[in-house]
Image (tube, rainbow, N blue to C red):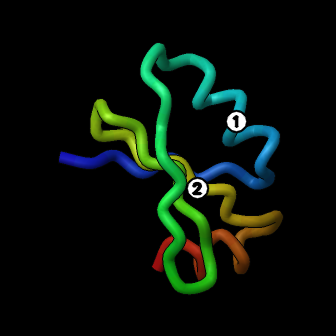
C-alpha cells in the first residue's frame, strides 16, 4: 500500500520526509518528481493552489 502526501512546496515535502528515519528515493515521473519512502509513503510537492494540486495528483 502507498500513501500519497501532497504539499504545496518542496520545503514542506522535505519537512515531512525528515519525520521518517529511512531515507527516500526521488522518482522522476512525467511533470513531477515523487519522493518515495521505503515505508510506503510517497511525498509530492504538488504546487500552490487547488488547481495545481489537483492537476499534479490526478
| Closer to us: 30 or 3 | 30
Q: Which residue, given by chain and number where applicable, does mark 1 sit on?
A: 14
Residue 13 location in percent, x, y?
67, 42
Q: Is residue 1 above or below residue 20?
A: below
Residue 53 appears left or right of 43: right
- Residue 25: x, y in percent? 48, 46
**Residue 39 position by quadrant:** top left
Residue 3 against residue 24 in the figure, above or below: below
Q: Which residue is mark 2?
A: 44
Write the residue at 42% across / 51% down. Answer: 4
Residue at 49%, 19% (x, y): give it. 20
Q: Residues within 10 Å of mark 2 (few under 14, many from 20)?
A: many
Q: Is residue 48 above or below residue 35?
A: below
Tell me which residue sits at (53%, 54%) in the image: 26
Q: Position of residue 15 (x, y in %)?
A: 71, 28
Q: Nearer the viewer, residue 6 or 49?
A: 6
Q: Are marks 2 and 1 in contact (CB under 8 Å)?
A: no
Q: What is the quadrant of residue 12 in the picture? A: top right
Q: Is residue 45 above or below residue 41?
A: below
Q: Quadrant of residue 54?
A: bottom right
Q: CA distance from mark 2 to mark 1?
A: 9 Å
Residue depicted at 72% across the width and 76% down the height? 52
Q: Secondary structure at mark 2?
A: strand
In-image side of 25 versus 39 (left or right)? right
Amino acid at each position: 500500500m502507498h500513501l500519497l502526501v501532497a504539499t504545496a512546496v518542496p520545503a514542506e515535502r522535505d519537512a515531512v520526509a525528515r519525520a521518517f528515519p529511512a531515507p527516500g528515493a526521488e522518482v522522476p515521473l512525467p511533470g513531477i518528481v515523487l519522493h518515495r519512502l521505503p515505508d510506503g509513503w510517497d511525498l509530492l510537492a504538488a504546487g500552490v493552489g487547488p488547481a495545481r494540486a489537483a492537476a499534479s495528483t490526478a
